[in-house]
């Protein structure tokens, strides 16, 4: 688990902590945000966790118990380090003698409301100059990719009625990874459960939606793992499909290997293998159908393992 400088600053601001002068991080020689509340100083490490000074051990033990852990060294707290927004909010509320489930829910909902109040999260659409086509299967693929994007970043999906974060954050981890200064122009939104992980990345040069964790499934009756990235490159819309045979059966096949490394450009209708751009060829119907198959599977998997935890009803 990790907590970015942006997540840290927003959380402490919502809690009403006092902002102090930035300090040098403990992991890297960079300035990091620093706050004080109830006599305890909290500052970002410069990497992926929070540190504190003057924190009473009994307060830490109580906070660890509130998040359902038995000792330091678990998900939220790691031997003096704070690794999650949940852990940070819980610790500060215990420190301020304000902890209750209702107060925790109120704070965490406000934190995520502020973190997600970014135009590129709420309204971003990856559509670019895709070549006009009468190919029915290609049109289907484009439609499925729009649907895929809307589930990787459900906060831009106007057809979903999402519950309050406090209702799903025990089942899902939602991370907004960004620096404090550049969060509107460069960020990663990651949503993960025990079985699935999606990632929406945005910056001025590259945007992509992806299945962050390989998904297990069947392909030609063989167990495989697959991952999909829908991305832009030079204002052109592309898809990357990676399929890995984890059954070992590909070793016995002569003509039809099950492993797939396929990149397609939907603006030029070209296809190639990673690092083999010089061997780019015309996109084939077989390749389109293969990508359609796995995008459909990914949509179903994300809806089942992520979206169903987030929606009302």
Image (cartoon, rainbow, N blue to C red):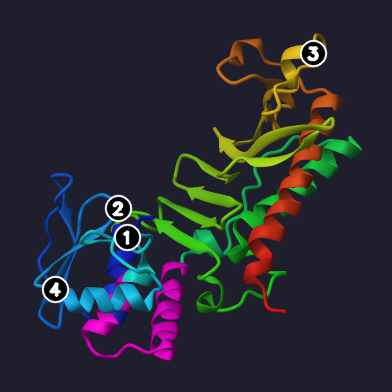
Q: Quick one: label 2 or label 4, which is nearer the N terminus?
A: 2
Q: Are marks 2 and 1 in contact (CB under 8 Å)?
A: yes
Of the residues tagged 2 and 1, which is closer to the observer? 1
Residue drawn at (82%, 10%) of the image:
255
Q: Quick one: label 1 or label 3, which is nearer the N terminus?
A: 1
206 horizontally vs 72: left or right = right
Dot 3: element: loop
List x then y, in percent, for residue 154. 62, 63
Q: Is residue 289 above or below residue 13?
A: above
Q: Indicate whether residue 113 is drawn in magenta.
A: yes
List x then y, in percent, for residue 13. 27, 76
Dot 2: element: loop
Residue matched to label 2: 48
Question: Tag on residue 107?
Answer: none
Q: CA distance from mark 1 to mark 3?
A: 46 Å
Dot 4: element: loop
Residue matched to label 1: 83
Of the residues tagged 2 and 4, which is closer to the observer? 4
The overriding secondary structure of the stretch rendered in magenta is: helix
């Amino acid at each position: 688990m990790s907590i970015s400088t942006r997540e840290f600053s927003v959380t402490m601001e919502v809690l009403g902590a006092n902002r102090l002068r930035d300090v040098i991080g403990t992991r890297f020689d960079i300035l990091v945000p620093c706050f004080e509340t109830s006599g305890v100083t909290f500052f970002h490490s410069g990497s992926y966790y929070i540190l504190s000074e003057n924190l009473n051990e009994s307060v830490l033990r109580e906070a660890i118990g509130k998040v359902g852990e038995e000792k330091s060294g678990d998900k939220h707290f790691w031997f003096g380090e704070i690794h999650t927004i949940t852990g940070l909010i819980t610790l500060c509320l215990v420190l301020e003698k304000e902890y209750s489930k209702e107060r925790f829910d109120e704070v965490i909902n406000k934190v995520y409301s502020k973190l997600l109040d970014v135009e590129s999260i709420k309204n971003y659409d990856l559509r670019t100059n895709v070549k006009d086509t009468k190919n029915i299967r290609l049109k289907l693929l484009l439609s499925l990719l729009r649907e895929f994007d809307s589930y990787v970043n459900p906060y831009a999906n106007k057809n979903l009625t999402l519950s309050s974060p406090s209702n799903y954050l025990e089942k899902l981890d939602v991370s907004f990874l960004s620096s404090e200064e550049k969060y509107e122009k460069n960020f990663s939104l990651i949503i993960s459960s025990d079985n699935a992980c999606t990632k929406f990345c945005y910056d001025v040069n590259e945007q992509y939606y992806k299945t962050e964790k390989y998904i297990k499934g069947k392909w030609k009756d063989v167990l495989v793992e697959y991952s999909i990235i829908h991305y832009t490159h030079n204002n052109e819309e592309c898809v990357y499909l990676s399929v890995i045979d984890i059954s070992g059966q590909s070793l016995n096949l002569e003509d039809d290997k099950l492993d797939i490394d396929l990149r397609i450009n939907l603006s030029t209708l070209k296809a190639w293998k990673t690092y083999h751009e010089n061997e780019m060829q015309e996109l084939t119907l077989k390749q389109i159908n293969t990508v359609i198959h796995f995008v459909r599977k990914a949509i179903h998997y994300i809806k089942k393992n992520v979206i169903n935890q987030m929606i009302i009803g």
